[in-house]
Amino acid sequence: MTLNKTIAALTLLVLISGFLIYKVYIVPSEMNADHRNTENNTASYKVLESQNIIVGKDIDQGHYDIKALDSEAEFFGDKMHKNAVLHARPFYLNSKMSIKGKIEFKPSEFKKVVKKNQQIIMKDPGHYVVGTEIPSGNYLLSRTSDKIRVFVDIKDETQTESLLTIQWEIGEKVKKPIVLELKKGYNVYIDKTGKEGYISNAGNLILEVNAQENE
């Protein structure tokens, strides 16, 4: 009897260990930088209305572009007007969130941002990776309007801690652009909000190539 209990206990321990290894190591690997591309993105298209969401049950894990389809929508506490977009939001297995109103969840395509006249216009708030969507290099960061609040957080490829955070409030006069060095693998998170805290796709951020630093 004791031997059977020992075998049962060891079997249970192996099963639990296997589950933890799967949860900690295998599952996150599907969301790492190597899988952050259109081909390997495990996200699937959904339109959902006011509800609580569990990733893996109500929606697949992966990276999503999130678009409000109602005039007064809300995603995970972020208020959104109709047609407002959040870019490449990662959804991790078993994570939970809530939404209000009708929202479109579209698998992200990670297209390279367009550079014109040595400038990159960043319209949509969200998550970007240097080398995939933003070319690596030295830049000057500015904004086109002081009617939006801006928060930018830059992490290295490990995403363990912030290398630089930038915050500009509504109405704040920015005297000069911020000098940035963006290396391949860096993660750039952009948050833009207008009055009353609504996500804003207006008031673009400008990344201008810093010719002096790139010489």
Image (spheres, helix red, strand yellow):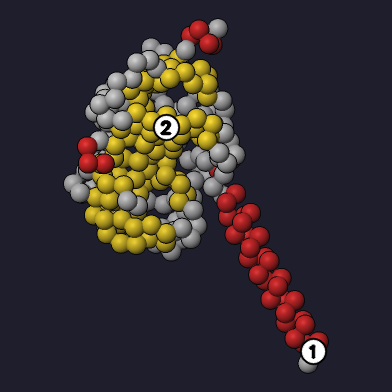
Residue 57: name its quadrant.
Answer: bottom left
Give the residue type that dot 1 points to: Thr
Which tag, 1 or 2, sits closer to the chain's start? 1
Question: Dividing the image into 4 quarters, which one contains the C terminus?
Answer: top right
- State the separation of the CA atoms marked 1 and 2: 59 Å
**CB contact under 8 Å: marks 1 and 2:** no
Q: Tell me where residue 94 appears, x and y as whole percent.
A: 48, 60
Q: Nearer the viewer, residue 48 or 140?
A: 140
Residue under pointer 1: 2
Q: Secondary structure at mark 2?
A: strand
Q: Would you call the spot at circle 2 few (<14 residues within 10 Å), some (14-19), or many (20 or more)?
A: some
Residue at position x 42%, y 41% in the image? 88
Residue at position x 81%, y 87% in the image? 3
Q: Is residue 109 left or right of residue 35?
A: left
Question: Dividing the image into 4 quarters, which one contains the N terminus?
Answer: bottom right
Give the residue type that dot 2 points to: Val
Q: Secondary structure at mark 1?
A: helix
Between label 1 and label 2, give the one nearer the viewer: 2
Q: Tell me where residue 115 appears, x and y as whole percent.
A: 41, 19
Q: Name the residue furthest left.
A: 71
In the rendered view, tell whether residue 186 sits above or below residue 196.
above
Residue at position x 63%, y 60% in the image? 22
In the rendered view, tell whether residue 212 sits above or below residue 115.
above
Q: Tell me where residue 34 appears, x and y as whole percent.
A: 58, 40
Q: Nearer the viewer, residue 75 or 58?
A: 75
Q: Tell me where residue 6 appears, x and y as whole percent.
A: 77, 82
Residue 58: name its quadrant.
Answer: bottom left
Residue under pointer 2: 152
